[in-house]
Each structure stands twice: as structure tokens, then as C-alpha cells.
Image (cartoon, rainbow, N blue to C red):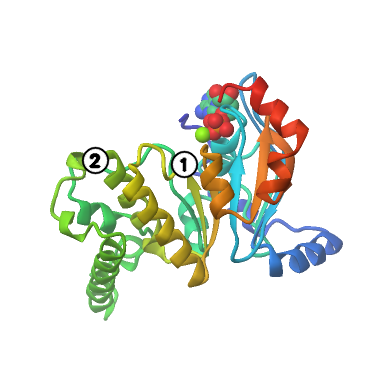
Amino acid sequence: MSSEPGGADADDATDTAVDTPAAAAEGARDAAEHPLVVEGLHKTFGGITAVDGASFSVAEGSLTGLIGPNGAGKSTTFNCITGVHTPTSGRIRFRGDDITGMAPHAIAQRGLVRTFQIARELPEMTVLENMMLAPKGQAGERLSYAVVPGLRDRVVEQEEELLERAWQQLEFFEIDHLAEEYAGTLSGGQRKLLEMARALMTDPEVVLLDEPLAGVNPTLEEKLLDRIHELREMGNTFLFVEHDMDVIMNNCEHVIVMHQGSVLAEGTPEQVTSDERVVEAYLGGDV
Ligand code: ADP
Ligand code: MG
């Protein structure tokens, strides 16, 4: 991944961007049913166009699949949505607010997080330490608690809450027995579980999963999918990149197909898999 100006280091300048009243009204209507709306997203890297006008929205409480041949722009779209990359143009709206170009931690605080295609644990730290690193912008990091009365207590309280939440997540994903192990010693599948557990530390509403099942054995895959459905029943919304069409067919009610940086088709799994353009894109692509 490239580190570029803007992206992760950008301040929240666009947070206060003023839209036209009509656009704002439309955004508010859509936001009630679609917490995440992507409008005309473009992202170029030098001469390469990774995302080329992608527009779609993700329905509240859904498990929406995002599929497409390798290089279609799925991961870059995730990067743009979650502030890892600054879009070249286009808009990202979350719950009606324009979050385009905001920093990843600011977006996460609003309740929108992602996992990465390649799990990003810190191998030299324990599983529990990795979990504790996940949430950003806590009182102790923002302010010098030595000079603010009562703040030290709040920081300690917050640390305790975080620790409790970390254990809850580790138990939920059944990796609590690995808490004191160095993350570098985990299997590929266990890393994916840790990656998801970490993403959930900030108690997000919408979670973007980039190939969460890649390299995961069938038993663990079943467990992960069960957890996703369980979380969904508790109110989470998921956008889910996955190669395995059987997994998409069996788990997603809505599927968005990307091809060459834009949305080629969307609909139910049955609709998109019987769409000739989709079949052609996959046959022509490197899948
Ligand atoms: P997908 O996740 O659908 O496989 P990606 O979003 O990873 O696709 O990639 C889309 C295109 O953008 C590819 O051609 C890829 O090589 C290119 N790309 C992605 N990230 C970068 C980057 N940081 N720098 C340059 N090109 C990139
Ligand atoms: Mg990808």
C-alpha cells in the first residue's frame, strides 16, 4: 500500500464541507436505509485507474457481498471508504454525513471500520496487546492527564473498560486462550480471527471485510461466518469481499459486482450469477 499525502494523515477538513440543500436532503433520506453510500468514486495511482466511478450503497443490517475479478478495485474502494486513501474524486457518505477524505480513526469513531485482505497484526506483540492498540483517540492519548484534575481516574477507568472489551471479543471469536501468545505465532486462520476481533473493538456499526476467509480452514471458516451472522442479528451491517461464490450465494442477500473500477451489476446472488455481463467479466478476468 502506498503512503500518500492526505490519506491517513489528512485532517477532517471535508467533514464540514457544505453540500447543496437538495443533495443533503437526498442524502438524509437515503441514510435512513443505507448507512453507507458511495457516489462516483474515482481513485488513480499515477497513471493507473484503480477505481473508475464506482457508485453503490449498503443497506442497513445487510450482509452485502462485493465481488469482482482480481484488480477490479475492491480493496482500493475499501481504502477510500475508510480513509486509508483519499479519493481522487467522488463522495463517501456515512449516515448522511460526508466523510470523504477524513482520517481512518475519525471514520472508525463514527462507527465504520474495515479489516484488511492481509491481516495487520503486530507479530512482536501479544494477541491481547494487539487488541488494546486497536481503538484510537482515547483520553490518555489526547490530553496530558497530569494537568487535568480527575482525568487520571478516567484514563484508568477507560483502560479497564478496554481490557474487558478485548477479553469479550477474544472469547467471542474463541481465541482467548491465545491472549498471551505473540501474534506472530498464530496460524493464518487465527490471524484472520484476531483481525476481525480488533476491528470490532471500537463497537462499529458498519464493518467492511476484505477477504476475511482467505487462508482460513473450513472449520474456522464456518465459525467466522457464524460470528458474522450473529453480529448481524445484533445490528451490525457488513460489506464483504469474497472470492468463493458458494460463500456469497449462501450468505449474502445482495451482491455488488465490480469490474475495471466500477459497478458492473448488482442484485441477489441469483441475479448477478445469471447476468451475462458478470459471467463474461469473470471469464475475461484473472480469477
Ligand atoms: P481488487 O481488490 O479488486 O483485487 P485492487 O483495489 O487491489 O483490486 O486494485 C485495483 C487496481 O489498482 C489494480 O490494478 C492494482 O494494481 C492497482 N492498485 C491498487 N493499489 C495500488 C497502489 N497503492 N498503487 C498503485 N496501484 C495500485
Ligand atoms: Mg483486493
- Above or below 61: residue 6: above
| Residue 176 or residue 12, whichever sits in front | 176
Q: Which residue is mark 2?
A: 187
Q: Position of residue 159 (x, y in %)?
A: 24, 69
Whether ligand 2 has any atom under 8 Å from the Cβ at mark 1 is answered as yes
Q: Position of residue 48 (x, y in %)?
A: 63, 21
Give the residue at x 61% y 33%: 73
Give the residue at x 30% y 51%: 194
Instruction: Confirm or deny contact between disc 1 and disc 2 (CB under 8 A).
Output: no
Q: What type is the residue that disc 2 sits on?
A: Ser
Q: Is residue 248 left or right of residue 141?
A: right
Task: Say which quarter of the image contains residue 277.
Answer: top right
- The single residue placed furthest to the bottom in the displayed view is 150
Secondary structure under tag 1 reads loop
- The single residue placed furthest to the left in the displayed view is 180
Q: Which mark is residue 1?
A: none
Disc nearer the start of the sequence (1/2): 2
Secondary structure under tag 2 reads loop
Q: Is residue 254 left or right of residue 178?
A: right
Q: What type is the residue that disc 1 sits on?
A: Glu
| Residue 18 or residue 116, whichever sits in front | 116
Task: Say which quarter of the image contains residue 15.
Answer: bottom right
Residue 245 visible here: yes
Task: Say which quarter of the image contains residue 216.
Answer: top left
Q: Which mark is residue 211?
A: 1
| Residue 273 or residue 20, whichever sits in front | 273
Q: Position of residue 135 (x, y in %)?
A: 36, 59
